[in-house]
Amino acid sequence: MALRVRPALPVLAVALALAAAATVARAASPAEQTKATKSYVFTLAIGMPEQMWTPAQVRSKHPAGGEVMLKGSMKPGMKMGGSQRHLEVHVRRRSNGRVVVGASPVISVYDTDPKTPMLMYVTVAEMRGVDAGVSDTHYGNNVQLVPGHGYRVTVILNGERVVFRVTV
Ligand SMILES: [Cu+2]
């Protein structure tokens, strides 16, 4: 018995390590795309839902992870669930590479699945990682996306527009 069990363990360990590595890779760089307009460079990232905190909650609870909302709010009625994703857009100024803070981009998500075409506007919050600096400032929210569906994500800032195509 022992002889049969022992060889199985390393295999299982390898499988678990691979699964963990895959999970980490997805979480770190889920679906990241960059596009530029005349004045800005936009980077879209879609990952697993983030815990979002208000500045007051960060001060009182000292959370180890998640993101702090500098402006805006978590979309009301959004439940943490299976097809929820964190959609965020980082914006840099093209002229000097600096992160754009305090902006109000409009972000919309269009489900391109022919059976369920739907346009929704993201309730845009300005946020950054609780343990990150100003350079992590970005815009977005947790949104409901259907795994396997293709989406067109449009970002408009001061009349400049980029369109990303993603599959969740
Ligand atoms: Cu975020």
Image (cartoon, rainbow, N blue to C red):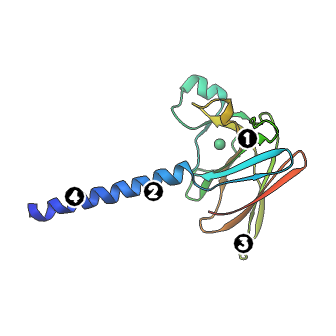
Amino acid type, residue under disc 1 in the picture: Ala
Query: How far across and down, in percent of the image, does residue 122 sit?
Result: 75, 51
**Outermost residue, bottom direction?**
115
Identify the mark at residue 22; answer none if there is no mark: 2
Residue at x 20% of width, y 62% of height: 8
CB-based contact (under 8 Å), mark 3 and mark 4: no
CA gap between label 4 and label 2 equals 20 Å
Amino acid type, residue under disc 4 in the picture: Leu
Q: Earlier in the sequence, mark 4 or mark 2?
A: 4
Q: Which residue is mark 4?
A: 9
Q: Earlier in the sequence, mark 2 or mark 1?
A: 2
Looking at the image, is mark 1 or mark 4 nearer the viewer?
4
CB-based contact (under 8 Å), mark 3 and mark 1: no
Quadrant of the displayed image that contains ligand 1 = top right
Q: Which residue is mark 3?
A: 116
Q: Which residue is mark 1?
A: 125
Left or right of 123 on screen, residue 86: left
Q: Quadrant of residue 39?
A: top right
Q: SS of the residue at dot 1?
A: strand
Looking at the image, is mark 3 or mark 1 nearer the viewer?
1
Which class describes the residues within 10 Å of circle 3: few (<14), some (14-19), or many (20+)? Answer: few
Q: SS of the residue at dot 3?
A: loop
Quarter in which the C terminus is drawn: bottom right
Left or right of 100 on screen, residue 31: left
Amino acid type, residue under disc 3 in the picture: Thr
CA gap between label 3 and label 1 equals 26 Å
**Outermost residue, right direction?**
159
- Position of 114 relative to 135 (above/below): below
